[in-house]
């Protein structure tokens, strides 16, 4: 496992796309192994392009690791994509090797910084690990729905800052 302080957050760059696709596939394959997420990789790449064109912001968590004498290499631990005007968090993924390292918490914190009035997302109801994580991060279930592409039941979850009395 990695040290939570061993990564930084930065805007996603075009060179990060392949790594983002790799960890998205790996993350989802670990969560729902019955679905071929490798076959869905082209959809993700087009979707990320559309999100970018629509004003969404992508951030990556990058782990730095020592490579030889004084050299450093880095790898993408996770990413988040959120639209700052709507607060909709469209994508968040953390590579299976980085679960429990603090990368996911840092990405949610970054989403809250980008959209300080609202963070909203849809999560599969059959993914209780993710639901518990989002609840731990302060999101609450506000409604139920259905993914139009897969037909899977979803929860809409939202975070809003506490208002002072």
Image (tube, rainbow, N blue to C red):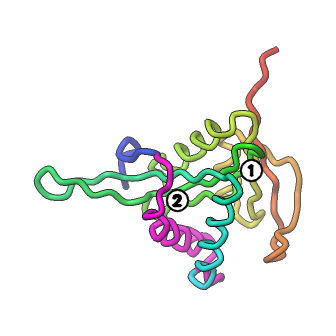
Q: Which residue lies furthest to the front in this view?
A: 53
Considering only order in the chain, which callout, 1 or 2, is on the residue closer to the N terminus? 1
**In the rendered image, the vertical position of residue 42 relative to residue 5, given as above or below:** below
Residue located beneath label 2 in the image = 94
Q: Position of residue 18 (x, y in %)?
A: 46, 71
Quarter in which the C terminus is drawn: top right
Q: Position of residue 152 (x, y in %)?
A: 81, 72
User: Mark 2 and mark 1: span between their CA atoms?
Assistant: 18 Å
In this picture, which residue range is highlighted in magenta?
A: 10-37
Q: Does the magenta stretch include residue 163?
A: no
Q: Position of residue 136 (x, y in %)?
A: 65, 42
Q: Residue 88 carries which label?
A: 1
10 Å neighbourhood of mark 1: few (<14), some, or many (≥20)?
A: some
Residue occupying image coordinates x 46% and y 45%:
9
Q: Quick one: 56 or 33, which is closer to the camera?
A: 56
Q: Which residue lies furthest to the top in this view?
A: 165
- Is residue 101 toward the left or the right of residue 146 in the image? left
Residue occupying image coordinates x 88% and y 58%:
144
**In the rendered image, the vertical position of residue 53 relative to residue 83, given as above or below:** below
- Secondary structure character of the magenta stretch overall: helix
- Is residue 100 toward the left or the right of residue 44 in the image? left
């Amino acid at each position: 496992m990695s040290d939570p302080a061993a990564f930084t957050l930065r805007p996603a760059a075009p060179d990060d796309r392949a790594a983002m696709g790799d960890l998205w596939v790996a993350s989802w394959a670990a969560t729902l192994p019955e679905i071929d997420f490798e076959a869905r990789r082209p959809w993700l790449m087009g979707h990320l392009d559309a999100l970018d064109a629509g004003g969404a912001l992508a951030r990556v968590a990058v782990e730095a690791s020592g490579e030889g004498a004084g050299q450093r290499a880095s790898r993408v631990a996770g990413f988040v994509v959120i639209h700052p005007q709507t607060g909709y968090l469209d994508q968040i993924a953390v590579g299976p090797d980085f679960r429990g390292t603090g990368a996911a918490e840092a990405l949610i914190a970054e989403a809250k910084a980008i959209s300080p009035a609202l963070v909203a997302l849809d999560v599969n109801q059959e993914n209780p690990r993710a639901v518990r994580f989002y609840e731990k991060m302060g999101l609450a279930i506000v409604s139920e729905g259905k993914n139009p592409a897969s037909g899977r039941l979803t929860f809409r979850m939202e975070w809003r800052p506490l208002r002072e009395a």
